[in-house]
Structures are given as C-alpha cells and as structure tokens.
Image (tube, rainbow, N blue to C red):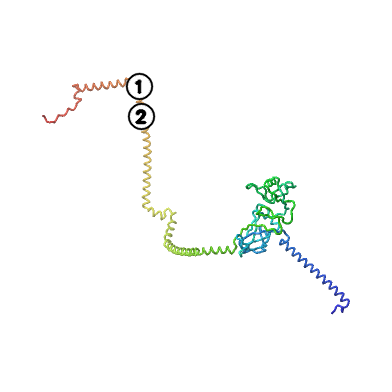
Amino acid sequence: MPAQDLTPQLRTRLSRVERAVGVFVSIATLLLLTGFVYYLYNTAERKGWFLTKARYFTFIDTGAGLKVGDPVRMMGFDVGAITRIDAQPPEDRFFNIYVEFEIKDPYYGYMWTEGSRARVASADLLGKRGLEVTKGTNGAPTYIFIQIRDIAPADAERLPDLANKVFLEEHHGEGTNVICAPQQVVTVDALKALEAANVPKVRIGDTKIVSKKMTGVWNDKVGKYDVYTKTSPPYWLLADESPALADRLERLANQVEVALPNILNLTNQLGQVLSNAAKVTATADSVLDSVRPAITNLTVISSQIKDPKGSLGEWLIPTNLNSQLLLTLESANRAMTNASITLESADTNLTTIAVGLDKTLENLAEITSNLNAQVQANTNLVTDLSTTIVHADEMIQGLKHHWLLRSAFKTNKPAKSTSPKK
C-alpha cells in the first residue's frame, strides 16, 4: 500500500517506528565498531604492536621445525617473534639459512654484545624447534636510545657536564692499551689520549637526552655505534644450533643398525647361558637329592652336640678309652705333683749347699788372707820353711843309709842282664 494512501495517523506512527529503528541500528553499529576497535587494541597490545622492537638475525644450518611467526623466548618468556626465514644465496659457502626476528620492549635491554646468543633447539617430539636468546653478560647494549654526536676530541674537552657524556666507540693505543670503550664516561684524560693518537673525531652520546626510538646499533666490525635508521641492518647474534629431530633419529637409527648384530649375538649368548643354567639347575637338583640324607644325619648329629654325652663325643672318644685317658691324666697329675715337690726340695737343698759353700769359701778366703798377712809381715818365713824342708830331706836321706833303718827303705835291685856272654 503506498504511503500516500495511509491516513495521517498511520503515517505519523510509521515515521516514529522508522526513527526508532534507525536509532537502534545506529546504536548497534556504534557498539559493533566499539567492540571491534577494543578487540584490535587488545590484540595489538597483547601482541606488542605498539611496543618498540629491536631487530636481530642469525644463521643456522637448516630451517626444519621453524616457521615465520614462531615465538622467540628468553628466560622462559615470549619476548618476540620470527619475522623472516630464507635460504642464503647459492654462492654463500659458509651459511645456509637466514633467520630474522624481533625482540620487543623491554627485553631487548637484556641483549648485550657479549654473552647474548641465539639457540635453536627441539621444542617437542614431533620435529618442532624453537628459537631462544640468552641474556648478555658483558660488553655494551646492542641498541641505544640516547643522542649521538661526532666531535673532535679538542672540542669535546670544552663541552659542559662531561659526567653525563659517554663514548660510543672504542679506540686502542699501543698494544692492548684501551683508550676508550663504549658506555665509558668521557674524561679529559681520555680525550687528550685520543688527541695524541691523532683521532680526528670521536662519537659520544648524551645520557640526558633520551629518545623513545632507537638511535644507534652496535657495529662489531668497526667497533662503534652506527646511527640507526629504518634501513639499518639488524644486529647479528651468533647461533648455537642442535640437530633437528629427524637428523637425530636418523643418527640413532644408524647406531641401532650398527649395534643390532651385536645385540643379536648377545641375545644368542644369553640364550645359551640360560640353557646351561637350566642344565646346571637340573644337575644341582639330583645332587641335592643324593646329599639330602647326609644333611639330615648331620642335622641330627649337630642337634646332639650340646649333650655332654653326645654322639660326636662317643665317636671321637669311646667309653673305655675315656676311662683309660682319665686314669692316665690322674697318674700324670700325681707325677707332676711329685716332680714339683722334688724340684722344690732340690731347690731348697741346693740353696742350703750354696749357702754352706759360700761360707766355706769365705773361711778359705779368711785363711788365705791371714796367711798372706803372715807372709807379708814375716818375709823370712818362706826362706825358713824352704830351709826346713831341705834339712828334713837330708835327714831322711841320712836315715835311708843308716844300718838300723836301711830295711825300712827297701829299694828295687837292678835286674840282671840276660844278654849272652861274650
């Protein structure tokens, strides 16, 4: 029905309904747009679209298990994502795969020129690999956010507030002597040393002037911070790569294939050993059956050992031998007692004899001592005694020749000669 055919009341109601529907559609559209914007903002915040990101790259042998968009982890956190995986040109003889990734704020602050490395390792048992970066330990930050300025050393000496200025490059003097190092505070002595080394300009930074965007990236080749632009190359992290799961499984399969004959050999030997063990067990059973009666008898005998008249004692020493042995031992005991008494008596007699002999020797010593004293007192005693003995001998010889006493001193007559007369 055309609108002009409607009554004024119906047209008024229809216009009100149309306005209400328009308002509802407008509110619904606004809510939908608000929800979509909130979703985009939440997603951007969750994925770090609004955060500053530092770019890095590394080289690996194979890209197996990695893909663009995979997270980059550090100390157990997701700190970035892989942005590019590509093969190196065919003429590159040193590297195979180029991997570029980003690390978001504030985690790129942990990346230093020494100690930070990219590690590629297995992430699961299905061949998936993950990229992980390690925290730096020394050196200088890979990216800086302070103002960069190149100035002659002589002019730098006249700069105000040198305590807030730092060197952004390194210079060496003679030998290994370091004149300045990155992030080292600028001093007048260091500037004079650079001037003496004929350094035309030195790159320094002002720590008071900090930018929200990166201003410099470290260049390992020239040993200084390069000014960062959108076209600046990423910072190179050396890689520690573990073999892919397929390669590791292949190596394991090769080792198993090499070791399998030895395992089969070992299995055969083990079967032979088990067979021999079964035979030994059967033989041992028969031996045990034959030994069981002896063990039973031994058990009975051992149970009677505690008895003073046990069977073992009866076997070793019979009853009659036991009686004779007791008599012999008693006789031996009596003999030993008598011998002991005799020895005690002999000991007593010997002691008495020794005492008497000692006294006799003492008396003899006194006699000889007295005799010696008499001889020493009378020196003519020996001469007189000798003269007396000589006179006594002469008297005896005279008596031998006296007629009255000649018969008392009979002498043997000489034997007659039996030799024939001439």
Element type at marker 2? helix
Q: Residues within 10 Å of mark 1 (few under 14, many from 20)?
A: few
What amino acid does circle 1 point to? Gln
Q: Distance of mark 2 from mark 1, alpha carbons?
A: 22 Å
In front: label 2 or label 1:
1
Please tell me which of labels 2 and 1 falls first in the chain: 2
In the picture, the disc for residue 361 is: 2
What amino acid does circle 2 point to? Leu
In the picture, the disc for residue 165 is: none
Which residue is outermost to the left? Answer: 422
Height in image: 319 above or below 3?
Answer: above
- Give residue 41's position: percent from left, percent from top: 75, 63
For label 1, the residue is 376
Element type at marker 1? helix
Q: Residue 401's image quarter?
A: top left
- Residue sitting nearer the eye, 63 or 294: 63
Tell me the quarter of the image containing the N terminus: bottom right
